[in-house]
Image (cartoon, helix red, strand yellow):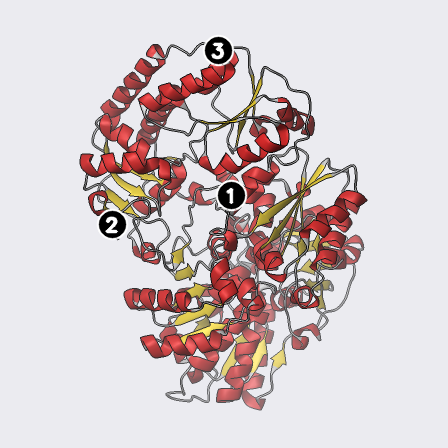
Amino acid sequence: MRQVAQITPAYTGDVSGVCSALYELGGMIVIHDAAGCGATYSAFDEPRWYSHDGLVFVSGLTENQAILGDDQQLINDTIESAQALQPKFIALVGSPIPMITAVDFPAIARELETATGIPTMGFEATGMHSYIAGAARAFAGLAEKMVREPDTKTPALRLNILGVTPLDFGINGSAQGLRQVFEAQGIPVQAVWAMGASLADIEASANASVNLVVSAAGLKAARVLQQRFDMPYVVGVPYGPQHTAKLIAALQQTLGDRQNRVVGKVQRDPKTVIIGESVTALSLVQALNLPATVLCPVTSDAEILSQGVIKTNSEADLLPYLKAATTIIADPLYQPICPKAARLVPLPHVAFSGNTYQTTMPALITGFEQFQKQFGF
Amino acid sequence: MALPIGEATFPQPFKTGLAYSVLSCGGWPLVHVGMLVPEAHLIFVCPQNCLRGVTLVAAQMQAADRFSTVAVLEADVIDGDMEALTIDGVAEIIAHLPKRPPAVLVFTNCIHHFVGTDLEVVYATLREKYPDIQFTDCYMNPIMRQSGLNPEQTMRKQLYSLLKPQAKDQHSVNIIGNNFPMDASNDLMQLLTKNGFTPREVTTCQNYDQYQAMASSVLNIITLPVALAAGKMLAEELDQPPLFLPLTFDATEISTQLQQLSAALDIAPPDVTSVKAQSEAALAAALADIGQTPIAISFSACPRPLSLAKLLLDHGFNVTKIFADMFISLEAADFAALQKMKPDLELYPLTQATMRQLPRTSTEPTLAIGAEAAYYTGTGHYVDLIEGSGLFGFNGIVRLAQLLQQAHRTVQDQRNLIQIANRGRGCLL
């Protein structure tokens, strides 16, 4: 059965994905749920909880409220907290039970915005998709609602980097590294969506000329920005100098011809398997110049999958590929389903193992060569 | 956000609203509780977001081999065949286990309740299909927390639902509902063992047979209110009378409880003169060390934080803050006493949204009892007490005084509170 996991953990869900995308931007995020989604987010999915005071709360939905369709408590409590905390925006996030009872989050968001005067977005997360789907909705919501018309439009290359959350990039300096890699090459970065950027940086994102999508979570926003501001995008992550050079060339090319690009294509080899988020995994095998089978167990997009990435939905989907492999690059919590004879190259992924291996997660943006050397690639 | 106890109302001093999830919340996850049944396999049938936390708890407990999941997808909800999903998912997991477990705990959650999954059919089918395995129904449904038994009460009840009737051992007594083993030196355990009784706890069972031996006991002692429903069920199912001896820090109440236990077992009540004196001496020694250092207590440390606060204030300590959203009814007398004794004792909510803005520092060195108290006061001096952590009676007070002294002398990394792997426990999920 595709939904069974005999021993491996579940990836971060879409509710946490929304929260993770918006966490640093000064908004108030309200998860409409009884309790568990908030506890899961704070305990397992948000490594910045201690270092950065985001405003993420739970509505405390009860059985009676859900059965009676009583949204008023949510509305009243949100208004009260918003008036006390004065956030820069409000984000309402759904969960499984509001999905069942068909809570109209966009409508409630409009009501809250009218009552408080604070920009409000409603995200219909269901708790039944991966974090990528949730973060993608959140970034797209920012692109639709918060990004304003450009102040100035430069013909030169100026980037937004889209799709950055600790769930894929950790808190090991990778987010800062993404900005530094391009600025070191003289390419200014307008905003990193959304780590190390302010809401003002994000609001001014239309001042950039090209968007770089570094995880599938950024793709939806890239398309919104293209539609709104005619900004093309390139998909890929700057791992290592050679792949970064290819990426910069693709960005320059896209600036000129306005064509979107996904950098890299998988050269399939069953002996080496990499499991991970689609864009980061695709870029990693490109950077390592490694023929491999690239497996993505979380939400992705046809545009990325068409580059040879294989979407998997369960442990059962993964097993045949793992059986054929001699080298597996994956989070250490995949170990129990890897063949004993295969070599597991540990690549901790916060969206999978949470804080279990957080301190040993390699900073591939700034430390790619070290990773290469350590594991003999 | 602080409210002086003199101005507070009992039992719920604070209004509810949006809730902040305290990172260092001190309860135990359902996974931990379910894992207390030795050799049992746990299967959660829930949406991905709900599975996320519990799967990581199992992994961090190094117990992923006793834990599996079935993800509920939107298509399952729309199709409406959640019964087939649950039965087939459980069957597939059992088929792939290296060893047949004696018991399987199947956890469903809020979504099953709302789509009307026929759980009777699910469990009847599983029991018929696997007569060699005991199944029990467990729930991770926080949405039902105000509808009858809350998830914690239900979990403690279901933990004992697998016990099968057997011949009684007149010298076997259970202590039920605790997530921590009783301290062997506490008054209750001493009274039992010195009189030839075998105390049985799920927390110390090494295998499934030992767990089943709990069915032979002639009495169930309950020290936590959350386990009262379990006691009621076992009285009906196994003819084991419950004896409720709620954890307290009041000397008179402790003496009364020990007399109650003696009467229930038809043994002579203990002479508590010596151990009571020891508790007074231990508190005096702790006070000499700790002096007027401010002390903060949170609800997760024990179900009766006001009883604890009163004990410490009575003995000269400087309790300044209590963190609790509400109090249990047993605390009424202590609440009233503290209102007179120290009306400026500050009460803080645990989860109110405004607590996110509390500075999480203290102006002077603070000693905390309980995870939230440590988190909110930002102190590294804390006693990581959860639900009493097996303390009981006068000896429990001796041990507590020692822990306070130890915490006063030692600075701990606060992050240990939030690392489930380090702490062995975490948020209630």
Q: Is residue B364 above or below residue A211?
A: above
Residue under the point 52% across and 13% down: B193
Q: Position of residue A183 (x, y in %)?
A: 44, 73
Disc marking residue A118:
none
Q: Chain of mark 1?
A: B
For label 1, the SS is helix
Q: Nearer the viewer, residue B240 or B386?
A: B240
Identify residue type, mark 3.
Answer: Ile
| Mark whose residue sits in front, 3 or 2 | 3
Which residue is denoted by mark 2 in the rendering? B2
Residue under the point 40% across and 65% down: A73
Earlier in the chain: of badge 1 and badge 3, it is 1
Graded by Cα atoms within 10 Å as few (under 14), some (14 to 19) or many (20 or more), the crowding at tag 2 reads some
Which residue is denoted by mark 3 in the rendering? B267
Which residue is denoted by mark 1 in the rendering? B152
Earlier in the chain: of badge 2 and badge 1, it is 2
Q: Nearer the viewer, residue A158 or A294?
A: A294
Q: Chain of mark 3?
A: B
